[in-house]
Structure formats: C-alpha cells, structure tokens
C-alpha cells in the first residue's frame, strides 16, 4: 500500500495533520477515520491493514489538541462546531481527491460523537457511517462535577484537567495497554470548556437521532466501562433510517478495534462496508 502524510486547514484555518493509505489497485471506496479522545490517527493499523488490501483508501487526521496537529497536547474547543468544521473541511478534501469512490465515515469514542454530530448537521455525500463505542448517553460523571465544569468554564475556559479515563478498560490485550501507556502522543488532558461542550454535544446528538439519514453500523463491547453501551443502543433504537445495524461484542472492552477480538471486528466492518459499495 502507499502511505502519505500532509496537512489541511480545519475550522478557522488551523493546520491539521492527516495521513492516507492507498491500495495498489483502483479503490472501491474511501473511509475517513475520526479518532477518539487523547489518542491520534496512527492507532488504527488493524483496520488499515485489513481494508486497504481490499481496495479501500483510508484517510485519517489528528484532531486539534491531539497528536501531530498540536504543540500542546490538550483537548480543547471553544465550541463543538470547531470539530464539525474540521471534519467538514476534511470530507471536502477527500471528496475532491477521491471523487470516483463512495465515501464512508468511521468514528471511535469521542470521534464517534463528533461523527454522529457532524452527520446530523451535514448528512449529504456519505454512503455510510460506522460508530464505535460512541458516548451518547450517561458517561458516569456526577451532576456536581458537571456543574463545577460549567462554573470553571465561565471563569477560565482553558483550565486543564485530567480526563480521568481508566486505561485498563481500553483493551484486554496487555500489549495494547503497554503501547498506549508508552505513546508520547497520548495525553489524557481536557479543559473546562471542552467538558461543557462535550456534554452539550451528547445531549443535542442523542435528541436528534431520529433525523439520522445515512446507512449506519454501530459497534460496542458489552464490557465497556469507559463508555456504557446503553447510550449507543438507545441512539440506535431512535434512528428511523431502515438501513441500520448494531453489533454487540460479548466481553469486549472500549476499543473494539484493538481488543483481543479485533479480527472479528474488522471483518464485520469490511463486510458491512463492501455490501454498500
């Protein structure tokens, strides 16, 4: 496969790092991966190594405050629309570069929320959407802490906090946990304003599930303690689109794409995508 790296301009003209893997044959589809909180775009090799040999061009980018797009590794937005704007700019770029291939979006965790929120605002031009463990319900933060976040956000929106993610819940594969802990591009930091925008985005997105238009596949491990499965299931049930599928992985942790059952997961994603090419 061919691998390239470059930059594009996100919302507000912010330079963002992206990379692409192209097959050696004419592509049958293009997939954009929208990564999760605190991580970066290079952590999806299991999916890349499966899809690209099957003729899918895979694009992905590092969010603002993440990976190679950031000087300071902290998740921060003034408004959730900044994430939507970044995705829209990237979709427009990929659509231009891959005009002959149907386009799909895949978002994991926070990236799943960003993707679902984006699609509800901009549903056109997509052949399908895959959401992996999206936070679309109760994520276990007490009302008191949420109130504290709103107070701090009003006073000092860029105040930095630890995200509090329990890393042991990411995957059942010890090698994945070790690599995660030793990755210099993974940070685990959020700001007060980010936390406020995060919860606002969850509420708005789940309240508009009925207007979700593209074909959708939602996947979630039923042992995910970082993002409870109930939220994604409720969102799925409220989607009116008839071409919708939901896969639960028994015993699966948060990152289905890097858990011990990842081969089953990437196979399910490949089969679902190819059926819609």
Image (cartoon, rainbow, N blue to C red):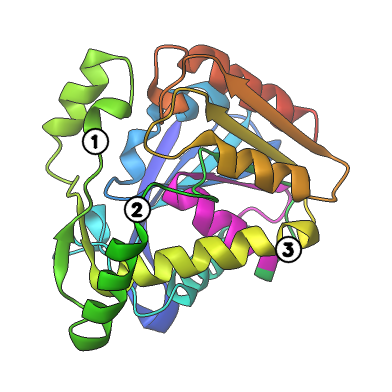
The residue shown at (39%, 83%) is: 12
Quadrant housing the C terminus: top right
Question: Considering only vertical position in the picture, is 96 above or below 236?
Answer: below
Would residue 28 be counted in the magenta stretch?
no
Q: Magenta stretch?
A: 97-120
Q: Which one is nearer the viewer's eye here, 242 or 50?
A: 242
| Residue lying farthest to the front in this orientation | 144
Which of the two discs, 1 and 2, labels the residue nearer the N terminus?
2
The mark closer to the camera, 3 or 2, is 2
Instruction: Rate crowding at label 3 as few (under 14), some (14 to 19) or many (20 or more) other CA atoms within 10 Å.
Output: some
> Which residue in the protein does label 3 denote?
123
Does 10 sit left or right of 215 as displayed? left
* Residue 242, position as x, y percentages in the image: 88, 42
The mark closer to the camera, 1 or 2, is 2
* Residue 7, position as x, y percentages in the image: 35, 63
- Contact flag, marks 3 and 2 (Cβ < 8 Å): no
CA–CA distance between discs 3 and 1?
Answer: 33 Å
Instruction: Rate crowding at label 2 as few (under 14), some (14 to 19) or many (20 or more) other CA atoms within 10 Å.
Output: few
Does 212 sit left or right of 109 as displayed? right
CA–CA distance between discs 1 and 2?
Answer: 13 Å
> Which residue in the protein does label 2 denote?
141
Which of the two discs, 3 and 2, labels the residue nearer the N terminus?
3
Residue 166: mark: 1
């Amino acid at each position: 496969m061919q691998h390239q790296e470059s930059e594009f301009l996100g919302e507000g003209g912010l330079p963002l790092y992206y990379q692409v893997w192209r097959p050696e044959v004419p592509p049958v589809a293009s997939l954009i991966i929208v990564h999760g909180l605190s991580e970066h775009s290079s952590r999806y090799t299991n999916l890349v190594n499966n899809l690209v040999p099957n003729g899918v061009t895979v694009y992905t980018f590092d969010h603002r405050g993440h990976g190679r797009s950031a000087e300071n590794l902290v998740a921060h937005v003034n408004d959730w629309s900044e994430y939507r704007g970044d995705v829209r700019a990237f979709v427009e770029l990929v659509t231009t570069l891959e005009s002959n291939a149907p386009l799909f979006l895949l978002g994991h965790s926070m990236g799943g929320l960003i993707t679902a929120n984006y699609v509800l605002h901009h549903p056109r031009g997509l052949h399908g959407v895959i959401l992996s463990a999206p936070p679309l319900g109760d994520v276990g933060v007490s009302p008191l802490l949420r109130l504290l976040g709103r107070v701090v956000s009003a006073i000092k929106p860029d105040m930095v906090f630890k995200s509090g993610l329990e890393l042991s819940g990411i995957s059942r594969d010890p090698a994945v946990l070790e690599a995660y802990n030793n990755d210099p591009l993974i940070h685990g930091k959020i700001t007060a304003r980010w936390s406020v925008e995060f919860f606002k985005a969850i509420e708005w997105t789940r309240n508009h599930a009925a207007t979700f238009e593209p074909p959708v596949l939602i996947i979630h491990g039923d042992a995910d303690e970082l993002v409870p499965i109930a939220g994604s299931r409720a969102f799925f049930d409220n989607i009116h689109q008839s071409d919708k599928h939901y896969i639960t992985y028994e015993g699966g942790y948060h990152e289905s794409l890097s858990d011990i059952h990842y081969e089953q997961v990437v196979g399910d994603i490949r089969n679902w995508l190819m059926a819609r090419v």
